[in-house]
Image (cartoon, grey):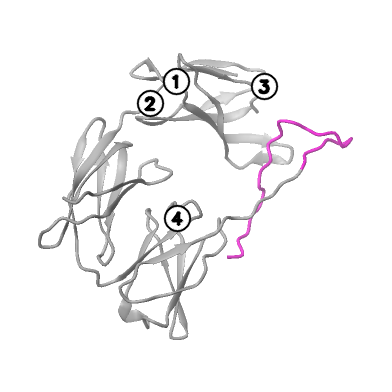
Amino acid sequence: SFAERLGEGRVPAPDVAIDVAWLFAEGVGGKLAPFTLRALTRSGADGGFEITGLAPGRLQLHVRGRSGAVKSRELTLSDDATIDGVILDLSPTGTISGQVSAAGGGPIVADVEVSGADLERPLRARSDAQGRYRIDAVPIGRVQVTARAPGRRSSGRTLIMRPGKTEQVNLELHAGAEISGRVIDGDDNPVRRAAVVVRSRGAETVVMTDHGGGFQLDPTAIEVGSATARALTPWHSPSPEVPIRDGEELLLRVGPGGALGGVVVDGNGRPVSGAVVTIAAFQSQG
């Protein structure tokens, strides 16, 4: 079991979800691949929590609060052991603000995203009529800031976020010479590292999406008006094939992946609670 205390500057952080990530564990058939069980419990009003019945192995605690995210040190849990006394201080974060403008002057209303560091999903904001934007709670580390607007090429900048700092990032968007697009899932979240397959003039080319799910195509390499595009990832069903039109941003929506369900029983057919089920092998069929 774990009995820990979360804190931001040693101030208790209540109602924070705690994940447990196993770096090494032994299964019935041998060593298991690393896996994570999410939100096994939440911290109480005093920041404390307890998780019992955990499988032995090498593991970490992962937590995320309003001001950032943190992982515990690597812990080794043996049978019937108890680990306590670890303090988890949620990492401080920074802020990114700035202005999006057209090349040569003039503010632009644009979608701005921050990805990278340990973000599972990009942080998003939209610039106002003066082109100004602000994104708070940016985690510490290397991040990518990207601005997009219809009819213009996306623009981005990479920087290192430091605790408590506000970084000024101004971005200029040039008139779009390329054809741009995005790949999203069923919840409108961007899908990074998706393969966008472009079919034109009897041939296929592939481009990969960036951290924000965006991609760009060279219009001179395809026959705009008759070319099509679709998105593929190992974790989703493919998007529909859509036509590529001049001046239109492509939006490719991938579907949900498949699902497995079943019952775990013992040798006598009785249900077994608390078992960990893992995928031992996986091969994508596109």
Which of disc 3 and disc 2 is earlier in sequence? Answer: 3
Residue 267 located within the stretch drawn in magenta: yes
x, y percentage for residue 90? Answer: 38, 26
Q: Choose the circle earlier in sequence order: 1 or 2.
A: 1
Label located before the other in sequence (4 or 3): 3
* Circle 2 crowding by C-alpha within 10 Å: few under 14, some 14–19, many from 20: many
Q: Which residue is mark 1?
A: 14
User: Residue 184's image quarter?
Assistant: bottom left
Label 3: element kind? loop
Quadrant of the frame with the N terminus: top right
Viewport quadrant of the C terminus: bottom right
Say above or below: 1 vs 104: above
Instruction: List the residue tagged with mark 4.
Output: 191
**Residue visible at 87% across and 37% down in the picture:** 269
Q: What secondary structure do most residues of the magenta stretch adopt?
A: loop
What crowding class fits label 1: few (fewer than 14 Cα within 10 Å), some (14-19), or many (20 or more)?
some
**Which circle marks residue 79 in the picture?**
3
The relative height of residue 185 versus residue 92 in the rendered view (above or below) is below
Image coordinates for residue 190, horizontal then vertical, percent: 42, 54
Using the image, determine if residue 250 lies above or below residue 266: below
First reached walking from the N terminus: tag 2 or tag 4: 2
Circle number at residue 90: 2
Q: Is residue 258 left or right of residue 7?
A: right
Q: Classify residue 136 as left or right of residue 204.
A: left
Q: Which range is magenta?
A: 263-286
Task: Check disc 4 and give the amino acid type.
Answer: Val
